[in-house]
């Protein structure tokens, strides 16, 4: 199968350099382009492919990144697939991989989902930057548009080569980021200052530094994405538990600090209280009278709702958002059901692209299960406006928050 035009253009653009970044939207076939680029380098003796562990050890019946790479290539050298999380969590794995790269004569290192290279205080990021020093050929893959994570660019470009930006992180922030400093007082005694990035500047200059080493691409297919909503009713018992949790958290003492962890715990417990409402299951049974259950993905937030869906709908593929929303190629499926809502727009957007991707021949349909409850309304609002729910909660007075929930 020949390359699509944009894939050929990506290959030709990055073939000129020993390092590069594919900022191609999820579903555009970054793995295929990566394999072409690797195959174009003669006499490699090691390929190290870092990827999220969930894409290396994928669910049964779902193609892994190893399957995808083997589909498009036949590397004539030793090939390692390494869970990117392992580099931060396992000293043994990190030292083992580092030593193999050091000993290789001509290694090629790929980081799939390079959004994982961002926080400079994270051990994973520091170790990947150390590994990068010993490989001349490097490629990063990212399904998030370049404009959505400009601050993360420093670590990603530093991984490719310090010669690209030629500035440390402090200089990068001072050159391209606008800041606002806020001072908060707690109990009229304690003060702390926090800086917030409120915008970016000198973007043309930034692009001039990196443009040779990146290729950007959006996904355009001949199939449609069709979105639907299914309304369901939360049962009386779940609603009572929900309200008790709301009252427990939304009091003056608990909200005094407006701590992120408190809001996260509150929303998780409140959503968990109604995640397995009987009417949700009943509505899905009705839906499966008209669509093919075996061609359907069901996304859940909780172990409890995953177990319920696997028991009630055994022919569907039941997945969790954070383990499976990124990286997996699920083009053999065409229906996606969001059994539990998720407020993270990036996760939601990526989950859409598990089915809507190169090679899909059928229209992709999506169903949101929408409960008659305040929290679901806030989930919808945050996704629609691409807001962070926790930050949104912190802007609301307690009375207003109670009313909305």
Image: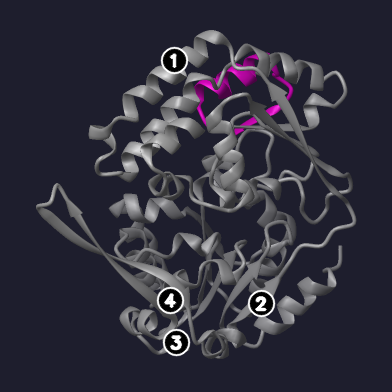
- Give how far apart the Cα atoms at labels 3 and 2 are: 17 Å
Label located before the other in sequence (4 or 3) = 4
Asked if residue 405 shows in the view, the reply is no
Residues drawn in magenta: 301-320
* Location of residue 380 by image quarter: top right
- Judged from this view, the residue extending furthest toward the top is 237
- Give how far apart the Cα atoms at labels 2 and 4 are: 17 Å
- Residue 22 position, x and y percent, is 63, 71
The residue that label 3 is drawn on is: 165
Label 4 secondary element:
helix
Q: Are marks 4 and 3 in contact (CB under 8 Å)?
A: yes
Residue at x 48% of width, y 20% of height: 273
Drawn side of residue 240 relative to residue 196, left or right: right
Residue at x 60% of width, y 33% of height: 319
Query: Eyeballing the image, is 382 above or below 304?
Result: below
- Depth check: give the residue in front, 280 or 376: 376
Label located before the other in sequence (1 or 2) = 2
Color encoding of the figure: one colour
- Residue 171 position, x and y percent, is 34, 85
- Give how far apart the Cα atoms at labels 1 and 2 are: 50 Å
Mark toward the viewer: 1 or 2: 1
Label located before the other in sequence (1 or 4) = 4
Circle 4 residues within 10 Å: few <14, some 14–19, many ≥20: many
Question: If the image is split into quadrants, where does the N terminus sit?
Answer: bottom right
Circle 2 residues within 10 Å: few <14, some 14–19, many ≥20: many
Q: Which mark is residue 241?
A: 1
Magenta region includes residue 307: yes
Q: Which mark is residue 215?
A: 2
The residue that label 4 is drawn on is: 154
Label located before the other in sequence (3 or 2) = 3
């Amino acid at each position: 199968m020949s390359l699509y035009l944009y894939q050929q253009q990506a290959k030709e653009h990055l073939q000129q350099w020993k390092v590069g970044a594919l900022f191609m939207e999820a579903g555009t076939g970054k793995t295929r382009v990566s394999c072409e680029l690797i195959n174009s380098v003669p006499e490699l003796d090691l390929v190290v492919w870092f990827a999220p562990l969930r894409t290396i050890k994928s669910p049964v019946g779902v193609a892994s990144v190893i399957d995808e790479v083997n589909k498009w290539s036949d590397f004539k050298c030793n090939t390692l697939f390494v869970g990117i999380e392992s580099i931060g969590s396992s000293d043994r794995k990190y030292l083992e991989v580092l030593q193999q790269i050091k000993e290789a004569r001509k290694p090629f290192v790929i980081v799939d989902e390079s959004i994982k290279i961002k926080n400079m205080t994270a051990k994973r990021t520091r170790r990947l930057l150390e590994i990068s020093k010993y490989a001349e050929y490097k490629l990063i893959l990212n399904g998030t548009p370049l404009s959505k994570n400009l601050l993360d660019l420093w670590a990603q470009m530093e991984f490719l080569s310090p010669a690209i930006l030629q500035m440390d992180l402090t200089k990068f922030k001072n050159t391209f980021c606008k800041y606002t400093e806020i001072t908060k007082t707690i109990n009229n005694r304690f003060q702390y200052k926090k800086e917030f990035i409120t915008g970016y500047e000198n973007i043309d200059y930034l692009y001039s530094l990196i443009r040779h080493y990146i290729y950007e691409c959006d996904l355009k297919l001949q199939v449609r994405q069709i979105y639907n909503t299914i309304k369901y009713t939360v049962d009386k018992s779940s609603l009572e538990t929900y309200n008790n949790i709301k009252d427990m958290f939304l009091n003056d003492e608990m909200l005094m600090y407006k701590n992120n962890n408190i809001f996260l715990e509150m929303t998780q417990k409140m959503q968990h209280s109604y995640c397995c409402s009987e009417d949700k299951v009943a509505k899905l049974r009705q839906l499966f009278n008209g669509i093919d259950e075996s061609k359907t993905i069901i996304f859940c937030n909780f172990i409890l709702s995953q177990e319920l869906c696997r028991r009630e709908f055994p022919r569907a593929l039941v997945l969790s958002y954070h383990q499976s929303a990124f990286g997996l190629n699920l083009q053999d499926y065409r229906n996606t059901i969001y059994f539990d809502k998720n407020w993270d727009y990036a996760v939601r957007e990526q989950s859409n692209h598990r089915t809507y991707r190169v090679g899909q021949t059928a229209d992709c349909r999506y169903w949101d299960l929408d409960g008659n409850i305040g929290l679901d309304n806030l989930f919808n609002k945050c996704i629609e406006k691409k807001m962070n729910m926790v930050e949104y909660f912190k802007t609301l007075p307690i009375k207003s928050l109670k009313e909305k929930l």
